[in-house]
Image (tube, grey):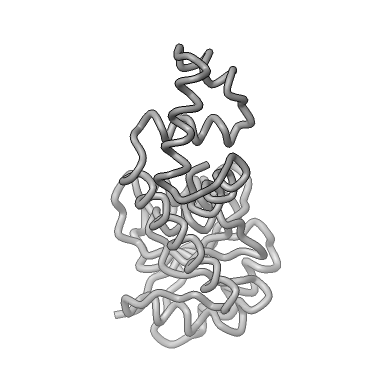
Amino acid sequence: MAIRLVLADDHPLILQALASLLRPEEGFEVVAACGHGVEALEAVRRHRPDILVLDLRMPGLSGLDVLRALAAEKLATRTILLTAMIRDDEMLEAIRLGIKGVLLKEMALASVVQCVRKVHAGENWLEKRSVARTLDKLMRRESGARDAAGVLTPRELEMVQMIGRGLRNKEIASQLSIGEQTVKVHLSRIYAKLGVDGRLALLRYAEDNGLL
């Protein structure tokens, strides 16, 4: 049975190149080629393809918007994200939303056929070492955030986030309706629990471990 695909990219030349590459490929069937996020979502709903090749940045609905909708509707289509660049926070959200592959546009045409076949077979595809390193970094950050959440109380986590927003002790005390001395006591406990030696070290720890 053919691998059924929906393609989505707002750049006509890229969309045409992808379609021209994939349509003649044995065992592939391109059921829709879309230049808009809304069109892509509707095409997946209508055709229920095996694979969606999805541009990250599109008008109407972004690639992440489409992924959120697919996850909410529990549609089984496996998605490959197509992008020229991707930020760490975008990568992390895409992973959480069930992305199965990432294709960087500079290499997409050379790799897309292999990527589609691997993702259809149930494998994940991280095309570049840099993307793999980003994924590894993000997973470490998530793990660090979970570890910190297990050590700190909800009030202490809230205080760490306030410090991340640049609030001073007096402002934290005011927002939490506690005394400034109580804030200092909480901070001392936080430093001890996390093994940091002050406010700047706490900020670095929080940034590195996804607490902010």
Residue at horizontal 61 percent and vertical 71 percent from the top: 104
**Closest to the observer: 94 or 160?**
160
- Looking at the image, residue 207 sits to the left or right of residue 49; the answer is right
Residue at horizontal 35 percent and vertical 49 percent from the top: 71
Residue at horizontal 37 percent and vertical 59 percent from the top: 98
- Percent from the top left, x then y, of residue 129? 57, 79
- Percent from the top left, x then y, of residue 161? 51, 34
Rendered view: 172 above or below 73? above
User: Which quadrant holds the N terminus?
Assistant: bottom left
**Closest to the observer: 101 or 48?**
101
**Closest to the observer: 121 or 194?**
194
Please count the marks in the image: 0
Rendered view: 211 above or below 175? below
Rendered view: 200 above or below 34? above
Residue at horizontal 65 percent and vertical 63 percent from the top: 85
Q: Quadrant of the rendered structure where residue 84 is? A: bottom right
